[in-house]
Amino acid sequence: MAEAEKVLAALELPVTLDRALVGGAAYEATGHPLPAETLAKAKAADALLFGAVGDPRFDTAERHLRPEQAILGLRAELGLFANLRPAKLFAGLEDSSALRPEVASAIDLLIVRELNGDVYFGEKGTRATASGEREGYDVMSYSESEVRRIAHVAFKAAQGRQKRLCSVDKANVLETSQLWRDVVIEVAADYPDVALSHMYVDNAAMQLVRNPGQFDVIVTGNLFGDILSDQASMCVGSIGLLASASLGVGRMGLYEPIHGSAPDIAGKGTANPLAMILSLAMLLRHSGGDEASAARIEAAVAAVLAAGCRGADLGGDMTTTALGDAVVAALNN
Amino acid sequence: MAEAEKVLAALELPVTLDRALVGGAAYEATGHPLPAETLAKAKAADALLFGAVGDPRFDTAERHLRPEQAILGLRAELGLFANLRPAKLFAGLEDSSALRPEVASAIDLLIVRELNGDVYFGEKGTRATASGEREGYDVMSYSESEVRRIAHVAFKAAQGRQKRLCSVDKANVLETSQLWRDVVIEVAADYPDVALSHMYVDNAAMQLVRNPGQFDVIVTGNLFGDILSDQASMCVGSIGLLASASLGVGRMGLYEPIHGSAPDIAGKGTANPLAMILSLAMLLRHSGGDEASAARIEAAVAAVLAAGCRGADLGGDMTTTALGDAVVAALNN
Ligand SMILES: CC(C)[C@H](C(=O)O)[C@@H](O)C(=O)O
Ligand SMILES: CC(C)[C@H](C(=O)O)[C@@H](O)C(=O)O
């Protein structure tokens, strides 16, 4: 986050920056991962840049007090239902992907993940079965309007790209998916210029390895989107490179890297700051309407990677700070 | 299936072979994807070799009449709760995987997928929301005993391999996963020689691309196992190479390729028969206790691939029949 703030400062934009604690840090300081003060600041803001959550030290806390509840709470409270996760190989990283260079180079896709529904937000808990044992349960569901609004976002995104939309579900087993598929087909009538296809999630996970270049826009539910977008991230070399935007109905949005908090390397100064810096670019574009600054940041990141700058995640030895400095320097070229 | 029968015949084992219709073919002939006669034959058998199901022509049929219900029904009716899906790169296929050769060569893993529970078999349907719209829903759940029995299978499998077990869940969001994780940890006490780790499913999907060689045995629920095993299959070059066993408490088992019915190539004679032939090997090993015949089939398949035999899925031009013939010929070398 410090590196993204450095980039923001270097741009000298008329932006007022405020900070608030969230997740594990907030829990330690206030006893709650999403304190009322943080939520109030978030609601008042025009855009949020979000540091990752998750810390194994809190894995045994009651569920509503765990760090993850902070990001789930913000997504729900702010109505951020559309998560945009673009994935594209940066020039110079052809040999960093676990995929063969010709497979990885073809990647240029956008995953549109629904973020306010699915098994994430349904009724859940532990109950006793008829025979008296413990059973954990979570209700998966989607309503027509939930599917419709995310489908519109995805079709519109496809219109601005290659006009191909693949909807991923598990309609051969799940009623939630069947409704999802039915509604996506209904919405398609409004977008005759977009070619719609459907794919089962198991096949999609396979195709994302076999030939990720086949996809333009993928739209899917909260759970499948969580899995597929992390998977796609590795196809481009490192999860430390991928930014995401979580949007609602207005211009307000939350922007975050798709990586987690990586507690194993916390404090070592080796985290890749580029995903956070690219999240700032998405913030300026979507919530700020400042395409020029967004493009300037993205060009700087591309230049830094093309020049061979690499952190530990890509087999190099540049620190988090050094990578941030390199981006700031590249901003002015 | 015809190629696997050919291999079975060539082995001249004292096996009585019976046939029954299932899935789309059974639906067309009898009006039901799993006719009573087929179920009765299945229950009477010592082992089942299963052809893939799924046909888009029936996607609009009522759910209980769709081909997929046949395999789900057999799994449930026969209590086949443990699905073993091994994945390993065959020599000669280093350049067939979408992964870089050094990444793909390191793959030697076993996915143990639970097969009788999860969101597959919970209550499901379409209901009206408070505001009167349609909502699809599916209840995900696992009880202690369901998790315990699959955990035992996985720990035992790990004991026979490299003694490393990774349990995959989404415990940071799902109560079903939290119970899963708690019970797996309890069961671990019986297997002090196995190193247990836990991984979130999104991270697992990423790690299976980044460095699949890190895994020995993976144990996971029905839905996550469906996704991850299809994904892993592509890492070894083609989904047409991967066999699976579905086991219950006794020696009876169902054996099937992990690929689907591939309706796009049905009747063209280009399907890869090797996954089905390798499924027959698993059948002879697990249900037949005939390790020698299983090893003989596997050696023949390996020899055929090492000799450069390739069907369309691997960029070659050998037909289904020609590949089956090649395996039969290799059996005697
Ligand atoms: C931290 C976790 C709750 C979250 C999710 O599953 O949505 C994360 O994995 C993500 O993808 O943003
Ligand atoms: C056909 C379908 C119901 C099945 C499943 O999802 O289990 C298949 O994908 C599999 O993995 O065997």
Image (cartoon, coloured by chain):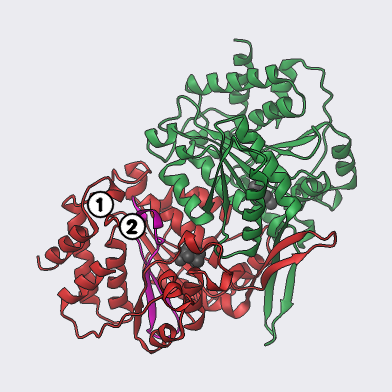
Chain colours: A red, B green
Residue sitting nearer the eye, B179 or B14: B179
Question: Is disc 2 surrounded by few (<14), some (14 to 19) or many (20+) residues within 10 Å?
Answer: many
Q: Which contiguous range is marked in magenta? A: A237-266
Q: Residue at x 69, y 55 (%)?
A: B57
Mark 2 highlights which residue? A240
How far across and how far down the image is residue A11, in percent?
Answer: 16, 76
How far across and how far down the image is residue B40, in percent?
Answer: 90, 41
The residue sitting at the left extreme is: A333
Callouts 1 and 2 in the same chain? yes
From the viewer's perspective, tell me whether residue A108 is left or right of residue B225. Answer: left
How far across and how far down the image is residue B295, in percent?
Answer: 64, 20
Residue A28 falls in image quadrant? bottom left
Label 1 secondary element:
loop
From the viewer's perspective, tell me whether residue A47 is left or right of residue B307. Answer: left
Residue type marked 2: Gly
From the viewer's perspective, tell me whether residue A177 is left or right of residue B89. Answer: right
Work out how far the residue at label 1 is from the one at label 2, CA to CA, in angstroms.
9 Å
CB of mark 1 within 8 Å of CB of mark 2?
Answer: yes
The residue sitting at the top extreme is: B333
Which chain letter goes with mark 2? A
Residue B94 vertical position relative to residue B177 in the rendered view, above or below: above
